[in-house]
Amino acid sequence: MKRQLLLLIALFVLLATAQGQGRVSYLPTDSLTICRLLDEAHSQPRTTNFPLFFAKKFLGIPYVAHTLEINDDERLVVNTRQLDCTTLVETVTALTLCAYRHLFTWRDYLNALVAMRYRQGQLDDYTSRIHYFTEWITLNTEAGIVTEIQEPNPPFSAIQQVNVNYMSRHPESYKALRAHPEYVPAIRQMEQSITGQRFSYIPKQAVKNSVLLRQVINDGDIIAITCKKAGLDIAHLGFAVWQADGLHLLNASMLHKKVVEEPMTLYQYLQQHSTHTGIRIIRISK
Protein backbone atom coordinates (compact mmCIF):
# COMPACT_ATOMS: atom_id res chain seq x y z
CA MET A 1 0.00 0.00 0.00
CA LYS A 2 2.82 2.38 0.89
CA ARG A 3 4.63 1.59 -2.37
CA GLN A 4 1.46 2.27 -4.41
CA LEU A 5 0.96 5.59 -2.59
CA LEU A 6 4.53 6.66 -3.34
CA LEU A 7 4.09 5.72 -7.00
CA LEU A 8 0.89 7.77 -7.23
CA ILE A 9 2.52 10.81 -5.60
CA ALA A 10 5.50 10.57 -7.94
CA LEU A 11 3.18 10.13 -10.91
CA PHE A 12 1.16 13.24 -9.99
CA VAL A 13 4.30 15.39 -9.83
CA LEU A 14 5.73 13.98 -13.05
CA LEU A 15 2.46 14.23 -14.94
CA ALA A 16 2.32 17.92 -14.12
CA THR A 17 5.91 18.39 -15.31
CA ALA A 18 5.43 16.51 -18.59
CA GLN A 19 2.09 18.14 -19.39
CA GLY A 20 3.63 21.54 -18.77
CA GLN A 21 6.24 20.85 -21.42
CA GLY A 22 3.54 19.93 -23.94
CA ARG A 23 5.78 17.61 -26.00
CA VAL A 24 4.93 14.26 -24.40
CA SER A 25 1.88 12.26 -25.50
CA TYR A 26 0.62 9.50 -23.18
CA LEU A 27 -2.18 8.37 -20.90
CA PRO A 28 -1.93 8.07 -17.10
CA THR A 29 -1.95 4.28 -17.40
CA ASP A 30 1.25 4.48 -19.47
CA SER A 31 3.02 6.40 -16.73
CA LEU A 32 1.75 3.99 -14.10
CA THR A 33 2.99 1.02 -16.13
CA ILE A 34 6.47 2.50 -16.62
CA CYS A 35 6.77 3.51 -12.96
CA ARG A 36 5.61 0.07 -11.82
CA LEU A 37 8.09 -1.74 -14.07
CA LEU A 38 10.97 0.47 -12.96
CA ASP A 39 9.97 -0.10 -9.35
CA GLU A 40 10.00 -3.87 -9.95
CA ALA A 41 13.40 -3.62 -11.65
CA HIS A 42 14.79 -1.71 -8.68
CA SER A 43 14.45 -4.80 -6.49
CA GLN A 44 15.88 -7.26 -9.04
CA PRO A 45 19.39 -8.71 -8.64
CA ARG A 46 22.05 -7.06 -10.77
CA THR A 47 22.50 -10.31 -12.72
CA THR A 48 18.94 -10.03 -14.12
CA ASN A 49 18.62 -10.18 -17.91
CA PHE A 50 16.74 -6.90 -18.06
CA PRO A 51 15.90 -6.89 -21.80
CA LEU A 52 14.00 -10.17 -21.39
CA PHE A 53 12.71 -9.21 -17.94
CA PHE A 54 10.99 -6.17 -19.45
CA ALA A 55 10.08 -7.68 -22.83
CA LYS A 56 8.17 -10.51 -21.19
CA LYS A 57 6.12 -7.98 -19.21
CA PHE A 58 4.52 -6.94 -22.50
CA LEU A 59 3.47 -10.41 -23.68
CA GLY A 60 -0.15 -10.25 -24.78
CA ILE A 61 -0.20 -6.49 -25.40
CA PRO A 62 -2.09 -5.80 -28.66
CA TYR A 63 -0.17 -5.15 -31.86
CA VAL A 64 -1.14 -1.76 -33.32
CA ALA A 65 0.79 -0.06 -36.12
CA HIS A 66 1.55 3.65 -36.47
CA THR A 67 1.12 4.55 -32.79
CA LEU A 68 3.77 7.27 -33.16
CA GLU A 69 1.72 9.02 -35.86
CA ILE A 70 -1.28 10.06 -33.75
CA ASN A 71 -0.47 13.76 -33.33
CA ASP A 72 -0.51 16.60 -35.84
CA ASP A 73 2.80 17.87 -34.44
CA GLU A 74 5.78 15.76 -33.41
CA ARG A 75 5.65 14.61 -29.77
CA LEU A 76 7.37 12.02 -27.64
CA VAL A 77 4.75 9.27 -27.70
CA VAL A 78 4.64 6.79 -24.82
CA ASN A 79 2.14 3.99 -25.39
CA THR A 80 2.44 0.81 -23.35
CA ARG A 81 -1.11 -0.31 -24.26
CA GLN A 82 -0.44 -0.86 -27.98
CA LEU A 83 2.88 -1.80 -29.55
CA ASP A 84 4.44 -2.48 -32.92
CA CYS A 85 7.82 -4.11 -33.43
CA THR A 86 9.75 -0.83 -33.22
CA THR A 87 7.97 0.64 -30.22
CA LEU A 88 8.33 -2.66 -28.34
CA VAL A 89 12.09 -2.55 -28.93
CA GLU A 90 12.34 1.12 -27.96
CA THR A 91 10.18 0.74 -24.85
CA VAL A 92 12.18 -2.24 -23.60
CA THR A 93 15.51 -0.62 -24.47
CA ALA A 94 14.65 2.58 -22.58
CA LEU A 95 13.54 0.58 -19.54
CA THR A 96 16.69 -1.54 -19.71
CA LEU A 97 18.95 1.51 -19.91
CA CYS A 98 17.27 2.93 -16.82
CA ALA A 99 17.79 -0.34 -14.94
CA TYR A 100 21.44 -0.64 -16.02
CA ARG A 101 22.13 2.95 -14.95
CA HIS A 102 20.13 2.76 -11.71
CA LEU A 103 17.68 5.43 -12.84
CA PHE A 104 14.14 4.63 -11.77
CA THR A 105 11.86 7.62 -12.39
CA TRP A 106 9.39 8.52 -15.13
CA ARG A 107 11.61 11.45 -16.10
CA ASP A 108 14.60 9.11 -16.43
CA TYR A 109 12.56 6.91 -18.75
CA LEU A 110 11.48 9.84 -20.93
CA ASN A 111 15.09 11.01 -21.17
CA ALA A 112 16.21 7.55 -22.28
CA LEU A 113 13.41 7.30 -24.84
CA VAL A 114 14.01 10.68 -26.44
CA ALA A 115 17.76 10.04 -26.53
CA MET A 116 17.32 6.91 -28.67
CA ARG A 117 14.33 7.93 -30.80
CA TYR A 118 15.56 11.34 -31.99
CA ARG A 119 18.72 12.38 -33.75
CA GLN A 120 21.20 13.69 -31.19
CA GLY A 121 18.38 13.38 -28.65
CA GLN A 122 16.70 16.54 -29.96
CA LEU A 123 12.93 16.39 -30.49
CA ASP A 124 12.06 18.96 -33.15
CA ASP A 125 9.76 18.06 -36.03
CA TYR A 126 9.02 14.78 -37.81
CA THR A 127 12.36 14.82 -39.61
CA SER A 128 14.27 14.81 -36.30
CA ARG A 129 12.95 11.32 -35.50
CA ILE A 130 15.07 8.34 -36.54
CA HIS A 131 12.99 6.44 -39.09
CA TYR A 132 15.24 3.73 -40.57
CA PHE A 133 16.56 1.14 -38.14
CA THR A 134 20.03 1.19 -39.70
CA GLU A 135 20.36 4.83 -38.67
CA TRP A 136 18.88 3.94 -35.27
CA ILE A 137 21.64 1.36 -34.77
CA THR A 138 24.40 3.66 -36.00
CA LEU A 139 23.44 6.72 -33.95
CA ASN A 140 22.64 4.76 -30.80
CA THR A 141 25.96 2.96 -31.12
CA GLU A 142 27.69 6.34 -31.28
CA ALA A 143 25.74 7.42 -28.19
CA GLY A 144 26.82 4.32 -26.25
CA ILE A 145 23.26 2.98 -26.02
CA VAL A 146 23.74 -0.18 -28.10
CA THR A 147 26.47 -2.16 -29.82
CA GLU A 148 26.04 -4.07 -33.06
CA ILE A 149 27.63 -7.51 -33.12
CA GLN A 150 29.19 -8.27 -36.53
CA GLU A 151 31.71 -11.03 -35.88
CA PRO A 152 33.02 -13.72 -35.99
CA ASN A 153 32.72 -14.98 -39.55
CA PRO A 154 31.01 -17.45 -39.53
CA PRO A 155 28.19 -16.96 -38.67
CA PHE A 156 28.36 -13.29 -39.82
CA SER A 157 29.19 -14.33 -43.36
CA ALA A 158 26.93 -12.02 -45.40
CA ILE A 159 27.13 -8.29 -46.10
CA GLN A 160 24.15 -5.96 -46.27
CA GLN A 161 24.78 -2.88 -48.39
CA VAL A 162 22.07 -0.46 -47.37
CA ASN A 163 19.98 1.20 -50.08
CA VAL A 164 17.00 3.07 -48.62
CA ASN A 165 14.58 5.43 -50.34
CA TYR A 166 11.13 4.09 -49.53
CA MET A 167 9.92 7.07 -47.51
CA SER A 168 10.90 9.74 -50.02
CA ARG A 169 9.50 7.69 -52.91
CA HIS A 170 6.23 6.94 -51.11
CA PRO A 171 5.41 10.07 -49.08
CA GLU A 172 1.70 9.34 -49.50
CA SER A 173 2.15 6.38 -47.14
CA TYR A 174 3.12 8.62 -44.22
CA LYS A 175 0.70 10.95 -42.45
CA ALA A 176 3.31 13.59 -41.65
CA LEU A 177 4.71 13.64 -45.19
CA ARG A 178 1.23 13.97 -46.68
CA ALA A 179 0.59 16.95 -44.40
CA HIS A 180 4.09 18.42 -44.82
CA PRO A 181 5.55 17.72 -48.26
CA GLU A 182 8.28 20.21 -47.40
CA TYR A 183 9.76 17.50 -45.13
CA VAL A 184 10.48 15.17 -48.05
CA PRO A 185 13.84 16.75 -49.07
CA ALA A 186 15.17 16.34 -45.51
CA ILE A 187 14.00 12.72 -45.48
CA ARG A 188 15.69 12.12 -48.85
CA GLN A 189 18.92 13.66 -47.56
CA MET A 190 18.81 11.39 -44.52
CA GLU A 191 18.26 8.34 -46.75
CA GLN A 192 21.23 9.29 -48.89
CA SER A 193 23.43 9.64 -45.79
CA ILE A 194 22.95 5.97 -44.82
CA THR A 195 22.72 4.47 -48.31
CA GLY A 196 25.92 2.62 -49.18
CA GLN A 197 26.78 1.65 -45.61
CA ARG A 198 27.79 -2.00 -45.22
CA PHE A 199 27.07 -4.31 -42.28
CA SER A 200 27.82 -7.96 -41.58
CA TYR A 201 24.83 -10.15 -40.82
CA ILE A 202 23.91 -13.80 -40.34
CA PRO A 203 22.21 -15.23 -43.46
CA LYS A 204 18.92 -16.92 -42.71
CA GLN A 205 20.18 -20.38 -43.69
CA ALA A 206 22.72 -20.13 -40.85
CA VAL A 207 20.19 -19.27 -38.11
CA LYS A 208 20.32 -22.75 -36.63
CA ASN A 209 20.44 -24.36 -33.20
CA SER A 210 24.22 -24.54 -33.06
CA VAL A 211 26.85 -24.12 -30.36
CA LEU A 212 28.37 -21.26 -32.36
CA LEU A 213 25.11 -19.32 -32.61
CA ARG A 214 24.41 -19.82 -28.91
CA GLN A 215 27.82 -18.30 -28.19
CA VAL A 216 27.28 -15.33 -30.51
CA ILE A 217 23.66 -14.39 -29.76
CA ASN A 218 22.59 -13.70 -26.18
CA ASP A 219 19.11 -13.93 -24.72
CA GLY A 220 17.66 -10.43 -24.90
CA ASP A 221 19.72 -9.25 -27.88
CA ILE A 222 17.76 -7.17 -30.38
CA ILE A 223 17.24 -9.05 -33.65
CA ALA A 224 16.81 -6.94 -36.79
CA ILE A 225 15.62 -8.97 -39.77
CA THR A 226 17.27 -7.83 -42.98
CA CYS A 227 15.31 -7.83 -46.21
CA LYS A 228 15.49 -7.33 -49.95
CA LYS A 229 12.36 -5.21 -50.26
CA ALA A 230 13.06 -2.26 -52.55
CA GLY A 231 14.03 0.86 -50.61
CA LEU A 232 14.05 -0.75 -47.17
CA ASP A 233 16.76 -2.09 -44.86
CA ILE A 234 15.00 -3.91 -42.02
CA ALA A 235 11.70 -5.81 -42.21
CA HIS A 236 11.03 -6.66 -38.56
CA LEU A 237 12.42 -6.46 -35.02
CA GLY A 238 12.27 -8.45 -31.83
CA PHE A 239 14.28 -9.97 -29.00
CA ALA A 240 16.30 -13.19 -28.96
CA VAL A 241 14.99 -16.00 -26.78
CA TRP A 242 16.85 -19.30 -26.71
CA GLN A 243 14.76 -22.43 -26.15
CA ALA A 244 15.69 -26.12 -26.26
CA ASP A 245 14.82 -26.38 -29.98
CA GLY A 246 16.68 -23.23 -31.00
CA LEU A 247 16.41 -19.46 -31.30
CA HIS A 248 12.96 -17.84 -31.05
CA LEU A 249 11.75 -14.27 -31.53
CA LEU A 250 9.85 -12.31 -28.88
CA ASN A 251 8.10 -9.65 -30.94
CA ALA A 252 5.06 -7.49 -31.50
CA SER A 253 3.49 -9.67 -34.16
CA MET A 254 1.15 -8.39 -36.86
CA LEU A 255 0.20 -12.03 -37.56
CA HIS A 256 -0.71 -12.87 -33.96
CA LYS A 257 -2.01 -9.32 -33.34
CA LYS A 258 -0.14 -9.10 -30.03
CA VAL A 259 3.28 -9.39 -28.40
CA VAL A 260 4.30 -13.05 -28.42
CA GLU A 261 7.19 -15.45 -28.21
CA GLU A 262 6.95 -17.04 -31.63
CA PRO A 263 6.13 -20.74 -31.21
CA MET A 264 8.21 -21.63 -34.27
CA THR A 265 11.96 -21.18 -34.29
CA LEU A 266 13.42 -18.09 -35.90
CA TYR A 267 14.95 -20.32 -38.59
CA GLN A 268 11.46 -21.59 -39.48
CA TYR A 269 10.04 -18.07 -39.31
CA LEU A 270 12.65 -16.70 -41.72
CA GLN A 271 12.08 -19.49 -44.25
CA GLN A 272 8.40 -18.51 -44.49
CA HIS A 273 9.27 -15.01 -45.74
CA SER A 274 10.93 -14.92 -49.15
CA THR A 275 12.08 -11.31 -48.80
CA HIS A 276 13.84 -11.91 -45.46
CA THR A 277 17.56 -12.44 -45.94
CA GLY A 278 18.97 -12.84 -42.42
CA ILE A 279 19.50 -11.11 -39.09
CA ARG A 280 21.58 -8.33 -37.60
CA ILE A 281 22.31 -8.52 -33.87
CA ILE A 282 22.24 -5.50 -31.57
CA ARG A 283 23.07 -5.59 -27.86
CA ILE A 284 21.95 -3.00 -25.32
CA SER A 285 25.01 -1.51 -23.62
CA LYS A 286 25.43 -1.86 -19.87
Image (cartoon, grey):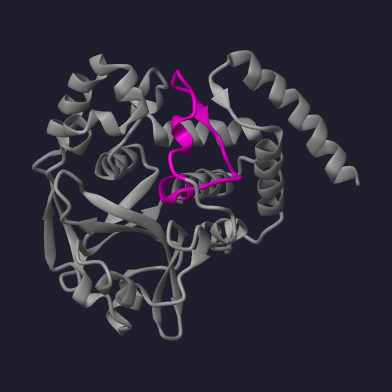
Q: Who's the residue at 45% across and 68% down the image?
A: 219
Q: Who's the residue at 34% across and 40% down the image?
A: 140
Q: Quadrant of residue 17?
A: top right
Q: Residue 235: give x, y in percent of width and height.
A: 28, 54
Q: Is residue 162 above or below residue 277?
A: above
Q: Is residue 16 above or below residue 42?
A: above
Residues shaded magenta: 65-88
**Residue 169 left/right relative to 261:** left
Q: Residue furthest right?
A: 1
Q: Quadrant of residue 6?
A: top right
**Residue 54 left/right relative to 195:** right
Q: Main secondary structure of the magenta part?
A: loop
Q: Can residue 127 be seen in this snapshot?
A: no
Q: Residue 180: give x, y in percent of width and height.
A: 31, 16
Asked if the stretch drawn in magenta spans residue 74, the answer is yes
Q: Residue 173: give x, y in percent of width and height.
A: 29, 34
Q: Who's the residue at 61% across and 45% down the image?
A: 81
